[in-house]
Amino acid sequence: MYSTVFYFIIGIIVFDFVFENILDYLNVKNMKAVLPDELRGVYDADKYARSQKYEKEKTRFSFFTGALSFVVILLMMFLKGFGYIDDIVSDISDNQYIRALLFFGFIGVGSDIISIPFQLYSTFVIEEKYGFNKTTVGTFITDKIKSWLLGAIIGGGLLLFIMWAFNETGVWFWAIVMAGLTIFTVFMNMFYSKLIVPLFNKQMPLEEGSLRSRLLKFGEEAGFKIENIFVIDGSKRSTKANAYFSGLGPKKRIVLYDTLIDDLEEEEVVAVLAHEIGHYKHGHIYSGMVISLVQTGIMLFLLSVFVTAPALSLAMGATQQSFYMGLLAFGLLYSPVSSITGLFSNIYSRKHEYEADKFANLYGYGKQLISGLIKLSVKNLSNLTPHWLYVFINYSHPTLLQRKERIEKELRD
């Protein structure tokens, strides 16, 4: 039985790798050498050529790193590398909780160490070459250490909680874990900007001035109380810009990247804010959270049914059944289901983006939103002609041209 599971896992790994690279190939092949008519006025010819060069270089590098990961995991499977790690942690401790922490710790840190040269190349060669990188070596090192510590604390804590629930609550395992993860998700949504972000970035209140006044004025017009507007030093790592909301209820705050403020006109920043407020007004934050938790609940229920099957642990190279080996095997087997649920999540997310755009448009900021999005796309050398299948499967947002066309249609109507 375990050999059937083993080869089924191998099949999933191979299929994922091949399918992802087919999508990347289609995406690159869909690029046009000559600036398409619909992009005239968005890109000039030189910027367009540079954006294509950037996309192709990222895709080639992604294929190389993906191929390496593909080979490593196949070697781990066929040479029973996971079983070897299981033997090591079993020799260190008889306590199943300690063994689980050590097992995933070895895998997590080991895989990250292997990937560090590629992370360095991506940041200090590719991103530097195209003018995006602002990360220093010191920042890279401290970010890495902080990420490991956070992963150990948060990831380790969640792993111990899941194992405890499985061992102590039996058939109610999935419901108990679901309740715990719901509390954790709400907590992180409320306090992420206060607890996690300051470990990596500085957040300063937006200073008094014209921009702050315009943002507050729009909030009043839209019936949205704005109290906390912060500027984050995104330029510490990259020239790319962003903006987002964090928190729930009275704990919500608006976070603007300093690069966003530098790159856009004030009316365009207000348009971006209007879009984000549109998400709140339409309840997207809460519905998205519910969808995510439902998906998690489905996964946990299936996990509770299959994780104790000895065939899962044996397929990963173990000599005896264990929760953490079964969990690892289940994660690989669940990949197709995760892809399908992710597909529907992306469809739902793109619908939300159109609704948030429409909200900004209804308040008279459609044109400013388009111009702001265009500026950001050009500055970030975004691929504006992705293949439709790549968009359907991977994009949580509509493309720039799709959003532009929809807003302009609404303006005409």
Image: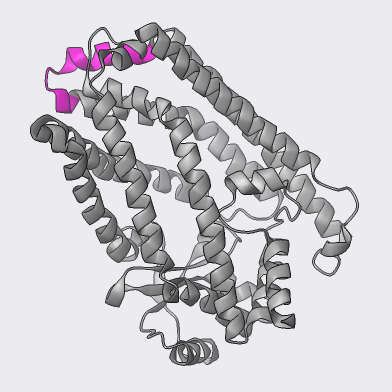
Residue 85 location, x and y as percent?
Answer: 31, 15
Q: Which percent across, then down, holds residue 164?
A: 13, 35
| In the image, farthest residue toward the left | 168
Q: Nearer the viewer, residue 298 or 330?
A: 298
- Residue at 62% x, 33% y is 20
Query: Which of 127/157 is in front?
Result: 157
**In the figure, is residue 176 to the left or right of 383?**
left
- Highlighted magenta segment, given as a residue range: 81-98
Asked whether 94 falls inside the magenta stretch, the response is: yes
Q: Is residue 165 visible?
A: yes
Compared to 23, does 293 lie above or below? below
Above or below 333: residue 92 = above
- The residue at the point 40 percent across, 7 percent down is 3
Residue drawn at 55 percent across, 70 percent down: 355
Give the side of residue 83 with respect to residue 97, left or right: right
**Furthest-right residue in this view:** 34
Q: Quadrant of residue 326?
A: top left
- Residue 288: percent from the left, percent from the top? 41, 59
Residue 131: percent from the left, percent from the top? 68, 55
Q: Can residue 85 be seen in this snapshot?
A: no
Tell me the quarter of the picture where residue 207 sits: bottom left
Residue nearer the viewer, 167 or 340: 340
Q: Is residue 384 left or right of residue 199?
A: right
